[in-house]
Amino acid sequence: MPELYDTRAPNPPSRAILIGIKLRDNSMHETEESLQELQQLAETAGIEVVCETIQPRNAPNPTYFIGEGKVEELKPLVEELDADAIIFDEELSPAQNRNLEKALDVATIDRTGLILQVFAQRALTKEARLQVALAQLEYALPRLTRMWTHLSRLATGGGGGRHLRGPGETQLEMDRRWVRRNIAHVRKALDAVEKQRHVQRRRRSEKVKVSLVGYTNAGKSTLFNVLTGETVLAEDKLFATLDSTTRKLDLPQKQQILLSDTVGFIKKLPHQLVAAFKATLEEVLEADLLLHVIDVSHPEAEAQIAAVNVVLGELEATDIPMFMVFNKIDRLKSDEELHILQCQYPDALPISAQRGDGIPTLIDALAQRFAERGTDISLCIPYTEGKALDLLHKHGIVLDTEYAVEAVHVKARLPNRYLKSVEQFLVSS
């Protein structure tokens, strides 16, 4: 297992100019909203935004993404505002990134690079740091410019991190070899994590599993804490939660499920992160139900719903049943905004995780959903088979009980996954 190092850049930028690009197929409103989200990402990364600008273009410039005139316009602006970074609200090619850094003599970061930086700052556990390290290394491999020199601290330690340069080997070739070797090390470590998670999931395979999914900062962790009584970190910031957390949740009628809080999604979520966080996101794939939490107070709520559905499609999780929850109704200025969304999604349940509105209704809805999944059975259980009775009371709903001389006659509703455990006592169904 490689020794882990800090995945954060040693000297991150502190003052940045944000660049939005309105392409032909995008509206100005969409571009402005995306740029506003980029500003939130920058602030989450601890970067002060000193200026924002948008350039309309029919198509990206192959050399700079933006036009050459815009590049010339930025040169004095960088100096005047004392900016040490330019952040683009699009993903730049390695060549575009290099060309911009050479022309402007300042660090150039694209949307993907900024999201990776935020993830690096938020990664607290060993698993999250491994996942972020893998995503950063794979992102850095085709770029390998001076802004990525901190990668030597990412995944492996000791004095032998880099080999001495061989005959005729360039610095770039040596760096690429080093990055590929570390990608292999981190993948090996993540494979071990994935196997461990698989064992954990197998132990709880008989439990009904519900995963919270949604756009970042939709309130998933707050809802998780309210439902389970836990104290998972819940901040009004993007990507407050990177690690998956699973806890038991007791529902009415003696039902018990496993509830998982997962990493939030975002528009243009880098594919490197989707791949790197596979072990964490498999909690979503293993779920019997997805609880899609939506910040109904956000002006782009519909776009965020669509972005979550795109990521779920990438994960091949669109066939899993989903229940939508409209969160943060306490922040709505009028009921009209909620009414418009409820016309589109009539089955969605309005709640306020922060204030507690609608939580009892949500719990009852979950109980009803899983109660309907069971099968009504009649059993004759000898008094010596206490484990079978315990299983019925723990995982099913006992509808009627009659005590005879040598056995207990029980009518119950039991989820299908438990039927095999009691089939020897089955009288009828």
Image: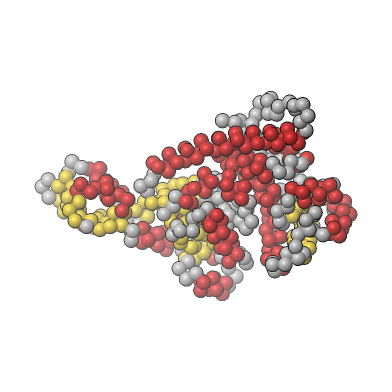
Which residue lies most toward the left here? 405
**Residue at the image point whose x is 81% and y is 49% from the top:** 99
Colouring of the image = secondary structure
Residue 356 image point, x, y percent: 48, 60
Q: Residue at x 55, y 35 (%)?
A: 188
Q: Nearer the viewer, residue 394 or 70?
A: 70
Does residue 223 appear left or right of residue 402 in this picture? right
Name the residue located 32 percent from the left edge and 50 percent from the top edge: 417
Q: Quadrant of residue 288?
A: bottom left
| Left or right of 214 on screen, residue 258 | left
Rendered location of residue 193, percent (x, y): 51, 38
Which quadrant, please, contains the C terminus? bottom left
Tell me if residue 407 comes above or below residue 175 in the rendering: below
Does any portion of residue 59 appear in the rendered image?
yes
Quadrant the N terminus occupies: top right
Q: Nearer the viewer, residue 225 or 10?
A: 10
How many numbered markers are drawn?
0
Occupied quadrant, residue 384: top left
Residue occupying the far front of the picture: 168
Q: Is residue 225 visible?
A: no
| Residue shown at the point (87%, 51%) measured from the top left | 79
Name the one closer to the observer, 50 or 32.
32
In the displayed structure, 71 sits above or below 172; it is below
Tell me: residue 149, above or below residue 362: above
Pinpoint residue 412: horizontal percent, then vertical percent. 24, 55
Does residue 275 appear left or right of residue 100 in this picture? left
